Image: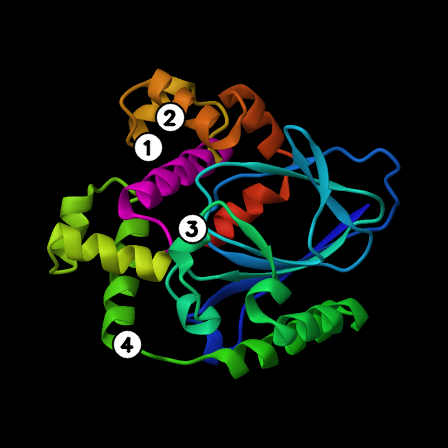
Amino acid sequence: MSKYQYRPPCRELSGYVQYYWMLDLEDVCPSCEPHRLTPQGFMEIVFYYRDSYKLILSDGEESHPRATLYGQRTEFIDILPTGRVGLMSVVFTPVGVRDILHLPLNELINRYVSLEEVLGREGKDMEEQMMNLASFDERVDGLETFLLGRLQRRNEFENNRMRMVMTRLLQCRGMFNVEQLAGYACLSKKQFERVFSTYVGLMPKQYLRVIRFLYAVEFRNRMPEVDLATLAFHTGYYDAAHLANEIKALTGHTSSTLFQLMCFSEDADSIEWFLGV
């Protein structure tokens, strides 16, 4: 039996954190299946506080960090729980993460790194604290103290500019091109690409691709009866083949397999929380 819990951030972190979530599986799984992490449009820190996880690679497996910072993704990875599942995550807003982590976000694309590797002793202390706390609320309170201590508001003008761009981008379901977004931001295309990648971690074209995919998944979850051609038409793809190819490239699944998996996955809830639908 699984138990999911969600909580929004405190007011001071509302522009930086989207939400926190925790998953506990009550039963030990002796032969767990790998879980596929697909592009989600955000960065997050995940604490695996029960049995360890492994990363599934083409040439074998390797141990996964107990406290992992996931960068923006344009491709998928597979992780494998080795027993009883327990994890806690903080999901950052697409723009706000920079003022908390103080890292070059574009160097974290498609990477997962231990919190200790990027934050040193501070990251290791946070990992140990998450391992020792018992309840969801205790973990959230500990995380918020940690995040507030790291929060440094730097360029509020550019922060607000990028937040406005992100709001517009999400409202239009990614059906913009880079030139339109640059114009909305009152920047040249080259300036916009530089600022966007600094604050979000992906180039605008890469991010638009991810957002269109997420809206396609969300649309299909709401209307499971629609066929692929209709779904493509409503979510900004040229045709069904274009959408099917994008799903395969971003998730490694066929469209039919992905939609079947999403019906039974917490990822569907995660997408809805992120898109605000």
Task: Give the labeled residue for mark 1.
Answer: 235
Tag 4 residue = 155
Q: In the rendered structure, which segment of residues is drawn in magenta?
A: 201-221
Q: Which of 228 and 199 is in front in this view?
A: 199
Q: Where is residue 115 in the image (x, y as percent from the top left)?
A: 61, 64
Q: What residue lies at 40% left-to-right and 36% top-to-bottom?
A: 213
Q: Real-space Cα distance between discs 4 and 2?
A: 39 Å
| Residue density around tag 3, few if under 14, some if 14–19, many if 20 or more, within 10 Å | some
Tell whether 132 sits left or right of 244: right
Res. 68 image quadrant? bottom right
Bin the neighbour count of mark 1 within 10 Å (Cα to Cα): few under 14, some 14-19, many 20 and up. many
Q: At which x and y percent is residue 187? A: 12, 59
Q: Nearer the viewer, residue 120 or 56?
A: 120
Residue 224 rendering spot, x and y as whole percentages:
50, 27
Identified by mark 3, the residue type is Leu
**Which residue: 41% across, 34% down?**
216
The residue tagged with tag 4: helix, strand or loop?
loop
Return the residue nearer the eye: 91 or 192.
192
Q: Which of marks 4 and 2 is nearer the N terminus?
A: 4
The label shown at residue 275 is 3
Kind of residue at badge 4: Asn
> Image quarter for residue 19?
bottom right
